[in-house]
Image (cartoon, rainbow, N blue to C red):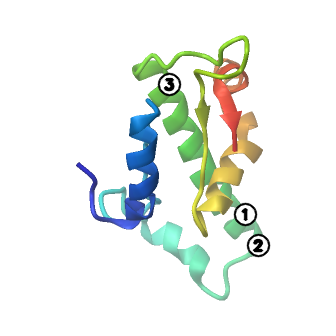
Amino acid sequence: MILRTSTAIFEKLMALAYTDGIRVVAINRRDYPGSTPLTTSDTAVFNADASSADKAAYIRARGVEIAIFIDHFVAQHHLPSISSDGTTGGFAILGWSFGNMFAHSAMANLDALSVGSQQMFGQYMRAL
């Protein structure tokens, strides 16, 4: 079942991926249907008077959330690491439209994760 939300853009990809044995996990950004709402302090960064530092902190925090989700997902679902020939296992990260900023933020801020989580990304991440 595909939830009819902003992740619907990936419906064709999900159908094709399934036939090739690829799992697609589409998450919505915060404040989109089915996701965690933004707090008042989160939305303050959208005001004209918000500082660049506040905006950068917001983007960093959203990226870290995504990286933590991926880390937990890999562990919880026992994903296989990348095979020695690089053709199977692991995961890829894809952001659509404005979501690309948060996908890149996740990668740019892996230093916020534990060393073990950073090592997991090194062993499992195939593409961005």
Q: Nearer the viewer, residue 28 or 57?
A: 28
Residue at the image position 54 percent from the left and 45 percent from the top = 65
Give coordinates of residue 24: x percent, y percent: 44, 41
Labels 3 & 1 near each other (Cβ < 8 A)? no
Give coordinates of residue 122: x percent, y percent: 73, 24
| N-term-proximal mark, 2 vs 3 | 2
Local crowd at mark 1 within 10 Å, few (<14), some, or many (≥20)? few
Labels 2 & 1 near each other (Cβ < 8 A)? yes
Q: Amino acid at mark 3?
A: Val
Location of mark 3 (residue): 74
Whether residue 54 sits left or right of residue 8 in the image: it is right
Residue at the image position 46 percent from the left and 52 percent from the top = 13
Location of mark 2 (residue): 52
Q: Amino acid at mark 2?
A: Ser
Whether residue 92 sits left or right of residue 7 in the image: it is right
Q: CA distance from mark 3 to mark 1?
A: 27 Å
Location of mark 1 (residue): 56
> Can you see residue 90?
yes
